[in-house]
Amino acid sequence: MSLTNQLSKQERESGSQFAPKFDSQGLLSAVGVDAETKEVLVLAFMNDEALAKTRTTGVVHFWSRSRGKLWMKGETSGNVLRVERILVDCDQDALLIHASPAGPTCHTGERSCFYRELRPEADDSSALVKVKT
Amino acid sequence: MSLTNQLSKQERESGSQFAPKFDSQGLLSAVGVDAETKEVLVLAFMNDEALAKTRTTGVVHFWSRSRGKLWMKGETSGNVLRVERILVDCDQDALLIHASPAGPTCHTGERSCFYRELRPEADDSSALVKVKT
Protein backbone atom coordinates (compact mmCIF):
# COMPACT_ATOMS: atom_id res chain seq x y z
CA MET A 1 0.00 0.00 0.00
CA SER A 2 2.89 2.35 0.61
CA LEU A 3 3.52 2.68 -3.09
CA THR A 4 0.10 4.21 -3.50
CA ASN A 5 0.94 7.47 -1.87
CA GLN A 6 4.22 7.88 -3.65
CA LEU A 7 2.63 8.22 -7.04
CA SER A 8 2.10 11.59 -8.62
CA LYS A 9 -1.27 12.27 -10.21
CA GLN A 10 0.29 11.75 -13.61
CA GLU A 11 1.94 8.48 -12.63
CA ARG A 12 -1.33 7.27 -11.15
CA GLU A 13 -3.35 8.15 -14.23
CA SER A 14 -0.92 7.51 -17.04
CA GLY A 15 1.60 5.08 -15.66
CA SER A 16 1.92 1.34 -15.82
CA GLN A 17 2.22 0.83 -12.07
CA PHE A 18 -0.77 -0.80 -10.44
CA ALA A 19 -1.33 0.97 -7.13
CA PRO A 20 -4.94 0.41 -6.12
CA LYS A 21 -6.33 3.29 -4.10
CA PHE A 22 -8.36 1.89 -1.24
CA ASP A 23 -10.67 4.35 0.48
CA SER A 24 -10.75 5.30 4.16
CA GLN A 25 -12.48 2.02 4.88
CA GLY A 26 -9.93 0.00 2.95
CA LEU A 27 -12.20 -0.63 0.00
CA LEU A 28 -12.35 -0.06 -3.71
CA SER A 29 -15.34 -0.44 -5.99
CA ALA A 30 -15.60 -3.26 -8.49
CA VAL A 31 -18.13 -3.66 -11.24
CA GLY A 32 -18.58 -7.03 -12.87
CA VAL A 33 -19.70 -7.33 -16.48
CA ASP A 34 -20.40 -10.36 -18.60
CA ALA A 35 -17.27 -10.77 -20.73
CA GLU A 36 -19.36 -11.90 -23.68
CA THR A 37 -22.46 -9.69 -23.63
CA LYS A 38 -20.92 -6.73 -21.72
CA GLU A 39 -24.01 -6.62 -19.52
CA VAL A 40 -23.34 -5.11 -16.09
CA LEU A 41 -23.97 -7.89 -13.59
CA VAL A 42 -22.97 -6.62 -10.16
CA LEU A 43 -21.33 -3.77 -8.30
CA ALA A 44 -19.60 -4.49 -5.01
CA PHE A 45 -16.48 -3.77 -2.99
CA MET A 46 -13.07 -5.32 -2.55
CA ASN A 47 -10.57 -4.92 0.23
CA ASP A 48 -6.94 -5.85 -0.36
CA GLU A 49 -7.60 -9.48 0.54
CA ALA A 50 -10.56 -9.79 -1.83
CA LEU A 51 -8.49 -8.27 -4.60
CA ALA A 52 -5.58 -10.59 -3.91
CA LYS A 53 -7.86 -13.64 -3.87
CA THR A 54 -9.51 -12.55 -7.10
CA ARG A 55 -6.14 -12.25 -8.76
CA THR A 56 -4.65 -15.47 -7.46
CA THR A 57 -7.70 -17.70 -7.93
CA GLY A 58 -9.14 -16.14 -11.08
CA VAL A 59 -12.56 -16.09 -9.44
CA VAL A 60 -14.18 -12.88 -8.22
CA HIS A 61 -14.09 -12.26 -4.46
CA PHE A 62 -15.69 -9.31 -2.71
CA TRP A 63 -15.74 -7.80 0.74
CA SER A 64 -19.25 -7.78 2.16
CA ARG A 65 -19.81 -4.52 3.98
CA SER A 66 -23.05 -5.76 5.56
CA ARG A 67 -21.61 -9.04 6.78
CA GLY A 68 -18.10 -7.75 7.41
CA LYS A 69 -16.42 -10.67 5.69
CA LEU A 70 -14.64 -11.86 2.60
CA TRP A 71 -17.01 -13.46 0.16
CA MET A 72 -16.39 -15.49 -2.98
CA LYS A 73 -19.13 -14.57 -5.41
CA GLY A 74 -21.10 -17.77 -5.89
CA GLU A 75 -19.71 -19.55 -2.85
CA THR A 76 -23.22 -20.68 -1.90
CA SER A 77 -24.96 -20.86 -5.28
CA GLY A 78 -22.02 -22.08 -7.30
CA ASN A 79 -22.57 -19.20 -9.68
CA VAL A 80 -19.01 -17.94 -9.62
CA LEU A 81 -17.63 -15.21 -11.85
CA ARG A 82 -14.51 -16.39 -13.63
CA VAL A 83 -12.20 -13.49 -14.37
CA GLU A 84 -11.41 -12.85 -18.01
CA ARG A 85 -9.96 -9.32 -17.80
CA ILE A 86 -9.49 -6.67 -15.13
CA LEU A 87 -9.51 -3.00 -16.10
CA VAL A 88 -8.50 -0.16 -13.81
CA ASP A 89 -9.89 3.35 -13.80
CA CYS A 90 -8.02 6.64 -14.04
CA ASP A 91 -7.40 7.20 -10.34
CA GLN A 92 -7.16 3.48 -9.56
CA ASP A 93 -9.98 3.37 -7.04
CA ALA A 94 -12.33 1.27 -9.17
CA LEU A 95 -12.05 -1.94 -11.16
CA LEU A 96 -14.02 -3.21 -14.12
CA ILE A 97 -14.00 -6.97 -14.26
CA HIS A 98 -14.95 -8.83 -17.40
CA ALA A 99 -16.04 -12.23 -16.25
CA SER A 100 -17.69 -15.44 -17.38
CA PRO A 101 -20.66 -16.12 -15.12
CA ALA A 102 -21.36 -19.75 -14.23
CA GLY A 103 -25.04 -18.88 -13.75
CA PRO A 104 -27.26 -16.02 -12.64
CA THR A 105 -25.10 -13.52 -10.80
CA CYS A 106 -27.74 -12.05 -8.50
CA HIS A 107 -28.70 -13.98 -5.37
CA THR A 108 -32.34 -13.39 -6.37
CA GLY A 109 -31.84 -15.62 -9.40
CA GLU A 110 -31.71 -12.77 -11.87
CA ARG A 111 -28.89 -12.74 -14.37
CA SER A 112 -27.89 -9.23 -13.29
CA CYS A 113 -28.43 -7.45 -9.98
CA PHE A 114 -29.76 -4.51 -12.00
CA TYR A 115 -33.16 -5.95 -12.84
CA ARG A 116 -35.35 -2.95 -12.03
CA GLU A 117 -35.66 0.39 -13.74
CA LEU A 118 -36.45 3.65 -11.98
CA ARG A 119 -39.33 5.29 -13.80
CA PRO A 120 -38.53 8.98 -14.07
CA GLU A 121 -41.96 10.44 -13.51
CA ALA A 122 -43.34 8.06 -10.93
CA ASP A 123 -43.69 8.58 -7.21
CA ASP A 124 -40.91 6.80 -5.33
CA SER A 125 -43.43 4.53 -3.66
CA SER A 126 -44.07 2.80 -6.98
CA ALA A 127 -41.16 3.88 -9.15
CA LEU A 128 -39.43 0.57 -9.83
CA VAL A 129 -40.42 -1.71 -12.66
CA LYS A 130 -38.92 -5.04 -13.50
CA VAL A 131 -36.93 -5.17 -16.73
CA LYS A 132 -35.86 -8.10 -18.80
CA THR A 133 -32.26 -9.00 -18.05
CA MET B 1 -34.47 8.24 4.08
CA SER B 2 -36.78 6.97 6.81
CA LEU B 3 -38.60 4.72 4.36
CA THR B 4 -35.38 2.86 3.72
CA ASN B 5 -35.30 1.16 7.07
CA GLN B 6 -38.95 0.20 7.04
CA LEU B 7 -38.57 -2.12 4.08
CA SER B 8 -38.26 -5.83 4.56
CA LYS B 9 -35.58 -7.61 2.58
CA GLN B 10 -38.24 -8.89 0.22
CA GLU B 11 -39.81 -5.46 -0.28
CA ARG B 12 -36.38 -3.99 -0.93
CA GLU B 13 -35.44 -6.64 -3.47
CA SER B 14 -38.74 -7.41 -5.15
CA GLY B 15 -40.88 -4.35 -4.59
CA SER B 16 -41.64 -1.32 -6.66
CA GLN B 17 -40.69 1.21 -3.99
CA PHE B 18 -37.52 3.12 -4.65
CA ALA B 19 -35.70 3.43 -1.33
CA PRO B 20 -32.03 4.07 -2.10
CA LYS B 21 -29.75 2.66 0.57
CA PHE B 22 -27.03 5.18 1.29
CA ASP B 23 -24.04 3.84 3.19
CA SER B 24 -22.62 5.09 6.49
CA GLN B 25 -21.10 8.02 4.64
CA GLY B 26 -24.36 8.89 2.92
CA LEU B 27 -23.29 7.54 -0.45
CA LEU B 28 -24.34 5.01 -3.01
CA SER B 29 -22.36 3.75 -5.96
CA ALA B 30 -23.25 4.66 -9.52
CA VAL B 31 -21.85 3.20 -12.70
CA GLY B 32 -22.34 5.03 -15.95
CA VAL B 33 -22.52 3.17 -19.24
CA ASP B 34 -22.91 4.42 -22.76
CA ALA B 35 -26.59 3.93 -23.57
CA GLU B 36 -25.75 3.00 -27.13
CA THR B 37 -22.61 0.89 -26.92
CA LYS B 38 -23.10 -0.35 -23.31
CA GLU B 39 -19.45 0.45 -22.60
CA VAL B 40 -18.76 1.16 -18.93
CA LEU B 41 -17.63 4.77 -18.77
CA VAL B 42 -17.27 5.75 -15.13
CA LEU B 43 -17.87 4.59 -11.58
CA ALA B 44 -18.46 7.18 -8.89
CA PHE B 45 -20.64 8.03 -5.90
CA MET B 46 -23.84 9.91 -5.28
CA ASN B 47 -25.20 11.39 -2.09
CA ASP B 48 -28.88 12.22 -1.83
CA GLU B 49 -28.35 15.65 -3.37
CA ALA B 50 -26.41 14.27 -6.35
CA LEU B 51 -29.11 11.69 -6.93
CA ALA B 52 -31.85 14.31 -6.70
CA LYS B 53 -30.02 16.62 -9.14
CA THR B 54 -29.45 13.75 -11.54
CA ARG B 55 -33.15 12.93 -11.50
CA THR B 56 -34.45 16.49 -11.80
CA THR B 57 -31.98 17.74 -14.41
CA GLY B 58 -31.53 14.56 -16.45
CA VAL B 59 -27.77 15.07 -16.32
CA VAL B 60 -25.50 12.92 -14.15
CA HIS B 61 -24.26 14.49 -10.91
CA PHE B 62 -21.86 12.85 -8.48
CA TRP B 63 -20.50 13.50 -5.04
CA SER B 64 -16.74 13.91 -5.14
CA ARG B 65 -15.25 12.16 -2.14
CA SER B 66 -11.84 13.71 -2.71
CA ARG B 67 -13.10 17.25 -3.09
CA GLY B 68 -16.04 16.90 -0.72
CA LYS B 69 -18.49 18.53 -3.07
CA LEU B 70 -21.33 18.01 -5.49
CA TRP B 71 -20.12 17.73 -9.03
CA MET B 72 -21.95 17.73 -12.33
CA LYS B 73 -20.11 15.33 -14.61
CA GLY B 74 -18.76 17.52 -17.42
CA GLU B 75 -19.24 20.82 -15.62
CA THR B 76 -15.74 21.89 -16.70
CA SER B 77 -15.28 19.99 -19.94
CA GLY B 78 -18.83 20.19 -21.18
CA ASN B 79 -18.82 16.44 -21.57
CA VAL B 80 -21.98 15.81 -19.64
CA LEU B 81 -23.74 12.48 -19.38
CA ARG B 82 -27.38 12.78 -20.33
CA VAL B 83 -29.50 10.21 -18.52
CA GLU B 84 -31.40 7.73 -20.64
CA ARG B 85 -32.30 5.10 -18.07
CA ILE B 86 -31.56 4.45 -14.41
CA LEU B 87 -31.48 0.88 -13.13
CA VAL B 88 -31.37 -0.08 -9.47
CA ASP B 89 -29.68 -3.13 -7.99
CA CYS B 90 -31.16 -5.79 -5.73
CA ASP B 91 -30.44 -4.14 -2.38
CA GLN B 92 -30.81 -0.61 -3.77
CA ASP B 93 -27.32 0.58 -2.86
CA ALA B 94 -26.06 0.89 -6.42
CA LEU B 95 -27.33 2.47 -9.62
CA LEU B 96 -26.62 1.67 -13.25
CA ILE B 97 -27.08 4.71 -15.43
CA HIS B 98 -27.45 4.40 -19.17
CA ALA B 99 -26.40 7.74 -20.54
CA SER B 100 -25.59 9.58 -23.73
CA PRO B 101 -22.11 11.08 -23.38
CA ALA B 102 -21.54 14.50 -24.95
CA GLY B 103 -17.85 13.67 -25.35
CA PRO B 104 -15.10 11.68 -23.66
CA THR B 105 -16.23 10.87 -20.15
CA CYS B 106 -12.82 10.64 -18.48
CA HIS B 107 -11.08 13.88 -17.49
CA THR B 108 -7.95 12.45 -19.13
CA GLY B 109 -9.68 12.67 -22.51
CA GLU B 110 -10.34 8.95 -22.77
CA ARG B 111 -13.81 7.85 -23.71
CA SER B 112 -14.00 5.64 -20.61
CA CYS B 113 -12.19 5.96 -17.29
CA PHE B 114 -11.32 2.26 -17.65
CA TYR B 115 -8.57 2.63 -20.24
CA ARG B 116 -5.95 0.37 -18.69
CA GLU B 117 -5.86 -3.37 -18.25
CA LEU B 118 -4.20 -5.18 -15.38
CA ARG B 119 -1.95 -7.83 -16.84
CA PRO B 120 -2.38 -10.96 -14.74
CA GLU B 121 1.16 -12.21 -14.67
CA ALA B 122 3.09 -8.96 -14.48
CA ASP B 123 4.72 -7.38 -11.48
CA ASP B 124 2.57 -4.58 -10.10
CA SER B 125 5.25 -2.02 -10.90
CA SER B 126 4.54 -2.51 -14.59
CA ALA B 127 1.18 -4.31 -14.69
CA LEU B 128 -1.00 -1.76 -16.45
CA VAL B 129 -1.28 -1.54 -20.20
CA LYS B 130 -3.32 0.91 -22.17
CA VAL B 131 -6.26 -0.55 -24.03
CA LYS B 132 -8.28 0.80 -26.87
CA THR B 133 -11.48 2.36 -25.57
Image (cartoon, coloured by chain):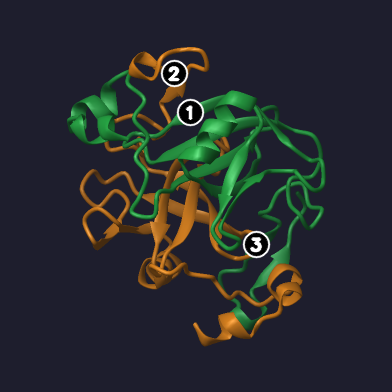
Chain colours: A orange, B green
Q: Identity of the amino acid at label 2? A: Val
Res B123 seen here: no
Q: Which mark lies nearer to you, 2 or 3?
A: 2
Mark 2 surroundings: few (<14), some (14-19) or many (≥20) residues within 10 A: few
Q: Quadrant of the C terminus of chain A?
A: top left
Q: Identity of the amino acid at label 3? A: Glu
Task: Give the SS element for disc 3.
Answer: strand
- Identify the residue at horizontal 47%, vertical 56% (top origin): A29
**Given the image, what chain letter belongs to the residue carrying mark 3?**
B
In the image, residue A26 lies at what x, y percent?
Answer: 40, 70
Q: Which residue corresponds to mark 1?
A: B87
Task: Give the SS element for disc 2.
Answer: loop
- Identify the residue at horizontal 37%, vertical 66% (top origin): A50
In the image, residue B133 lies at what x, y percent?
Answer: 75, 49
Q: Are marks 2 and 1 in contact (CB under 8 Å)?
A: yes
Q: Quadrant of residue B74?
A: top right
B105 up-or-down from A114: above or below = below
In the image, residue A21 lies at what x, y percent?
Answer: 53, 70
The disc label shown at residue B127, or none = none
Q: Looking at the picture, tell me which residue is in the foreground, B17 or A59.
A: B17
Q: Which residue corresponds to mark 2?
A: A131
Mark 1 surroundings: few (<14), some (14-19) or many (≥20) residues within 10 A: many
The disc label shown at residue B117, or none = 3
